[in-house]
Amino acid sequence: MQGKPRGFDKAMQLIERGVDIPNPWSLDIGDDVDLDRISSDGVTIHPGCRLHGAATVISAGVHLGEEGPATVRDCRLGPGVRLKAGYFDHAVFLEGSSMGLGAHVREGTLLEEQASGAHTVGLKQTILFPFVTLGSLINFCDVLMAGGTSRKDHSEVGSAYIHFNFTPDGNKTTASTFGDVARGVMLDQPAIFLGGQGGTVGPVQVGFGTVVGAGSILRDDVREDGLLVLTPAPDGVSRPNTPRRYKRLAPLLEKNLGYLAGLVALEAWYRTVRTPFFAQQEFGPLMLEGALEVLAGARAERTKRLAALIATIEPDTDGRRQLVDRHADLLASCAPDQVPGHLRQAPAALVGPLTAAAQAGTGYIAAVQALESPAKEAGTAWLQAMIDDTCRRAAALVPDMGLFEAD
């Protein structure tokens, strides 16, 4: 007679604690999974699921595998998360976020509250702010996206959309920002719409309220808010290909440094503003820990990719020579511990009412959206000052590159 499957005893322990597991014989639960990090409150684990990793957290109300088998490895799942089927590895999903059948979600991914993806979505090094919705058949790696005010008014990526994040030269200094951190965290900005059967060639920066028509390939920034963008197919081009020319090196560096600065600001937001809200959740401190790990990992990824590109640059101008010689200091300057002390302190007008709301049991989204305008403006100004300071300090290390001069 065949013996019990691996994890059967753990599945039975979970059932005894109140977890809904219709078929414990079908589960694969690794020896490294800590059952004390799995809630007994309203959790359902459907047949065919696999749980692995000591870091795994499953909060109250989570549903796994309702559309097919789900593999969860070292992921942290907040309250009410629904991972319907697919592969999920070293990612963090905050309250009410979800992914559909065939998802492939890998490290560096953070879905904030009520962010979601439909079926067959691939994510890696992706940060989605609350409400952001992805359609089906999407590859959306190396992206930060914000915008929208609710599940009925949300930034959306249409089906069959691709973020092109890998160049013919083999580099991935291609992270794109749709919206921004400083305004996006206030959850009051116009939604962004990327029409289906289209794509973005990273890196780009796109303003809030942008609508990109279906079938368009976005190749340039859309810095101004509220624009409709329809891009025709480019005229035919046939010319000699010169690898690693980097004709637009300064804008490329600016976008990568700006992305890093945004991550620094977002980490500060988590440490100062979000912490009391996580404290109200059953596994809140573990969820906060996981989110901070994702943000640190995102900075490490962007730094690694930028260093790899700089290593291929021919130092044939003063600016490029400075960049090659000082790149280690340049990249080190984009770390949270380099932010001046006076910029690390969040304004009391922001922190005070949010902390009080958290302690009163108000949820994060409701509390942020209830802030009065002066508090939101103070918070945005604080985060933007941190971003601007990080970019200025980086630019000062390579003055001959002329970075951020237009700003």
Image (cartoon, rainbow, N blue to C red):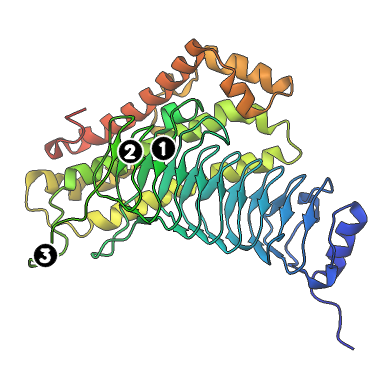
Can you identify the residue that label 2 sits on? 206
Q: Position of residue 156 (x, y in %)?
A: 47, 43
Badge 1 marks a residue whose secondary structure is loop
Q: Nearer the viewer, mark 1 or mark 2?
A: 1
In this picture, residue 132 sits left or right of residue 25: left
The residue labelled by disc 1 is 192
Q: Residue 11: x percent and y percent? A: 84, 64
Image height of 302 relative to 282, above or below:
below
Query: Which residue has dot 3 on it?
Result: 242
State the residue at coordinates (43%, 29%).
190
In this rendering, the answer to whether 376 lies above or below 44 is above
Marks 2 and 3, Cα distance to the nearest angstrom? 28 Å
Q: Name the spot of residue 28 as percent of width and height, x first.
A: 75, 70
Residue drawn at x 68%, y 54% as measured from the top left: 56
Sequence-wise, which precedes: disc 2 or disc 3?
2
Q: Is residue 265 above or below residue 235?
A: above
Distance from the alpha carbon under mark 3 to that under mark 1: 35 Å
Amino acid beneath label 3:
Thr
Q: Farthest residue to the bottom: give it.
A: 1
Earlier in the chain: of badge 3 and badge 1, it is 1
- Residues marked 1 and 2 touching at CB (< 8 Å): yes
Task: Provide residue 309's location: percent of width, then percent of height.
Answer: 25, 56
From where the camera sits, is residue 201 visible? no
- 301 and 28: which one is in front? 28
Query: Residue 292, can we see it?
Result: yes
